[in-house]
Amino acid sequence: MSQTVTKAAARTDGLRKVYGTGDASVEALRGITLDFAAGGFTAIMGASGSGKSTLLHCLAGLDTPTAGHVFIGDVDITQLSERQLTQLRRDKIGFVFQAYNLIPTLTARENITLPLDIAGRDVDQAWFDEVVDTTGLRDRLSHKPTELSGGQQQRVAGARALVSRPEIVFADEPTGNLDSRSSEELLRFLRGAVTDHGQTIVMVTHDAKAASYADRAVFLGDGRVVDEMELPTADRILDRLKSLEV
Amino acid sequence: MLRATIKSLLARKVRLLLTGLAVVLGVGFTAGTFILTDTALASFDDLFGQVFANIDVVVQAHQAFNPTQGGSGGSGGGQELNPVPEDLLPKVRAVPGVRYAEGSVQSFAQVIDPTTGEVVQSGFSPTIGSSWSTDLSAFTLDPGGAAPVGPHQVVIDAGTATARGLAVGQQIRVVTPSGTGEYTISGFVRFGTSNSVLGASFAIFDLPTAQRLFQREGKFDFIYVQGDGSITPDQLATAISGVLPQRFEAITGTTAASVQQDQVNKALGFLRTGLLVFGFVALFVGAFIIFNTFNIVVTQRSRELALFRALGARRRQVMTSVLVEAAVVGLIASIVGVLVGSVLAIGLKALVGAIGLKLPPTALVVAPRTIIVSLILGTTITVVAAVSPARRASRLAPIEALRETAAPSVAIRRRVIGGSLVAVLGIGTLAAGLFAGVSNAGLVVGLGAALTFVGVAMLSPLVARPISSTLGRPFRRRISGKLGGENANRNPRRTASTAAALMIALALVAFVAVFSASLKSSVTAVLDRTIRSDLMLTASQFSPFSPQLAEHLSTDPDFSAVSPLRQGAEAKVRSSTTFPVGVDPATLTDVANIEMDAGSIEALSEHNSVIVSRTEADSKDFSVGGKVPMEFARTGLKQLTVVGIFEPNAILNDYAVSLDTYDRNVAQLLDTVVFLKYAPGVDQAAARAKVETLVDKDYPSVQVNDQEETKQQYVDQVNQIFVIIYVLLILSVIIAAFGIVNTLGLSIYERVRELGLLRAVGMSRRQVKRMIRVEAVIIAVLGALLGLAVGILFGWAMQRALSDVGIDRFAIPVGQLVVWLILGALLGVLAAIVPARRAAKLNVLEAISYE
């Protein structure tokens, strides 16, 4: 393997995922080989049923692939035990889900430090402050999730994903439940994490506007990578999606 | 609507199974109690039928009333009857229609195990001595044995023989009212097919020997008559009555059997009521679990139920659907409960066997009443417990169907007012039952306690949050503990009502602990205050022993005072039952401090006099110089002159008479206790050793104890009884634990997404389990704390209520209660095992994926 300029934060190699057996089986991923460069912001796009969520779950160690390999850094996570996977998610991966991101019994601050608390690690106060300041939620830290707006909740989830300095953050339709203003705030926050701190982010979305914040868009269709686009804009993405549907 | 109800029932089998379990156990215990007591009754009926199978008529002395127990202090055999003179037998035999008649004497006889030297007795079962019946016996001799003949032969029951490894021809010691003798075993008898009768031991001598040993020379207790078949037993009894002097009667064998059956019925009635109390407690605890489960289920199904409403179902229909669900669950659980009860009956049989009531191995009797009562009880309780959740369900607005989460409306003020009202009403009822002397006090106290529990349970959500926050504090250092604590705090109502079940169970445990501690403390203090003797001679299980022992010791110069005490015969004063004590007025004050309010003990030496306790004198309005109408079973009504009023104490019951007066009115002239006081300057160890040697040789059933040993013996006995009560209460504790399992399971079901998130962001399975465990422990400890508090209160109330009858000390067994608290916490850990495992095994992907 040759030394490349940008090291991959994560990559997949011939990733296949089949649900069910026999006649009832559905092939969700049909051999996906992708690199996610460190410090890059990748959007994974595709129609529903294209396999984009399955890909994200396999990447994050939440689902086990039928064949192929997933690497987070240098580690082949398909070889890890359940316990090692849990540790990997805790230490190396950050998550932002579409909804239900927060534990209702914990305050915003406690939700942000949750992965560190689970790991029993100390909070890096400087880094915590920096993350919190970029979310603009400093004055809401002692609030419970029910006292926050949807957009605020998602930014807390974003802060939680960043606070443990993971190698990679996976975001699964993070703006799916947000209005356009809240979406924009969250996406700007994620973009800033990549630009200012070199955070690697992989985001699944079906929203062209959201994808336009990424450095690169990968288009899935029917379990395969059908196209890629560097420095996407919303308009170009929409055009591409239209052409893909034909 | 009905179809929808049944569909939803089937869809939630596991949850209903757990809910049903609470009912199953409560109903099972209730049904088990019925089955056990019915079975016992049937076997007693059978037994008495066999005893009197060959006997058409029984001749005996008139009895003023039938004592409730067939002898003194459980020793058995002693009849509170005047004897029948021997010369009546020829007259009876001469009555036309009599084929055969014979005399019989009965008393106690304690067989001494040749290997251990101890009296053969299981628990409180009787040790019976009897004369051999040559012709009318219900016993059959085992092959190789022979009837007892002459003064040195005895027949033993096959049960004792087998248990102690006895053989025909072997020498054996037997204690009778005349003292201890050594006899040769001439044979073994069995009773029908069973080799023992309800655990009783039998020693059977030939008639002359039995008469001598039982101090019935020239007399019988009964004359048993068999007719020649020419006339009916009733006619025969009438015919025999004609030749009898006034003080005697002839009754048919059937009547004699039914009299004994009545006595057993009464005794079993007590046992049944006692056991049913625990069954009802279990059902009551179960009701809380049903209430809780249905509440949670209604919350979880609120969208579905609101959808019914949106689709046009009326409130009543929604309510009915929940109640029908409850009825179906209750009915199925009750049916299972009856089946479980049959199994439990076997276990209960072993438990009552442990206290000496050995029942013969007959088939279990499941009466239709058992099934009907069990089914109605179980179903009704389930439905009643579901009423409040059902009402809540019916009040759901159709709009709730569209909301994301149904916000439970907590009408906290109404709850406080309602809860306080119920609690006050409960405490008031309780107080009325304990202090006001109402009739049916037991029932009133039970009702008061139940209401108090409901009231406290209604109020407990108020304290649930602060208490569980405090309890959660030590766990907060780790995130799993913190989350577990927060979860316990999340819905204080749910936490509180889950804890309520355990509260009730542990309140009763704490009550029993506090009460028994107070009892032990009071009685040992009273013993210290009252008894001045150095040694006390008592027989095992309070069985009486020959007065010869006291007579023998009274001449011994090593002792300055020898004072015997007799007790056990039942008497009635204005139709309430009492057990008067016979004392020696000359020596009693040497061995006991009896505080007299009026009159003196010495005055008892006057013929037909009595001293009365202050409480009894107050309640029945007796004063010195007045008369106490005391009715003895043997001699009938006697007017006794009150010569003194004494403060209640450990030795004398409500009434004490002189030994002389006692002996004139009571058939069994045996001592129950002998108090000894060393003479000054005597070598006490040597004196005691001498007594022990004498007792070992001639009175093997008697134990020699000093003051400390007596107290210890008493404490041991109390402990033994309370251990059995604990065992019975454990059922309710188990049901309460199921309640925690159920709530946790339902909560986890609600929080699947949250658990998925926690696992996704890296929480390990171990941490998840710990989180659930912490929640369970907090709920359990909350319940235990509330329970201990309520239980201590109940114990205190009970002690106050009984302070007049000598339980004048209040004691809290702190160590024991701490142990129960720890056990409560452990119960939480146990209850968390299954839910925690389920939560840990949760499929993360499924949990976090959207619809």
Image (cartoon, coloured by chain):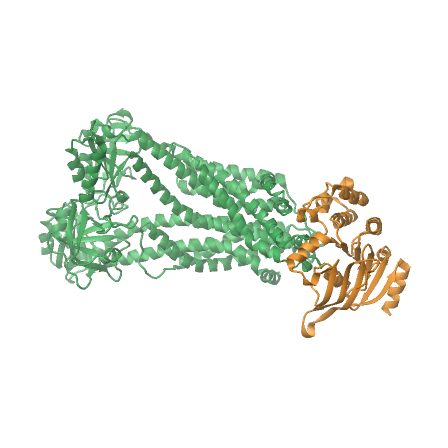
Chain colours: A orange, B green
Q: Quadrant of the N terminus of chain B?
A: bottom right
Q: Indicate whether B416 appears above or below B270.
A: above
The relative height of residue B507 versus residue B740 in the rendered view (above or below) is: above
At 40% from the left and 46% from the top, the residue drawn is B725
Q: Is residue B333 left or right of residue B540?
A: right
- Of residues B490 and B132, the one nearer the viewer is B490
In the rendered image, is residue B553 in sight? yes
In the picture as drawn, the residue positioned furthest to the bottom comes out as A23
Quarter of the view holding residue B519: top left
Residue B447 shows up from this direction: no
B55 vs A113, nearest the viewer: A113
Q: Residue furthest top?
A: B598
Residue B736, how many percent across, how many down? Answer: 51, 49
Q: Position of residue B685 (x, y in %)?
A: 23, 34
Relative to residue B308, is residue B278 drawn left or right?
A: left
| Relative to B281, B166 lies left or right | left
Q: What residue do we see at 36% from left, 60% from top? A: B364
Residue B601: % across, % down: 23, 28
Tell me the quarter of the image containing the C terminus of chain B: bottom right
Image-based side of A150 in relation to B675, left or right: right
Question: How far across and how far down the image is residue B125, in percent?
Answer: 28, 50
Q: Is B673 situated above or below B357?
A: above
Numbered circles on residues, count: 0
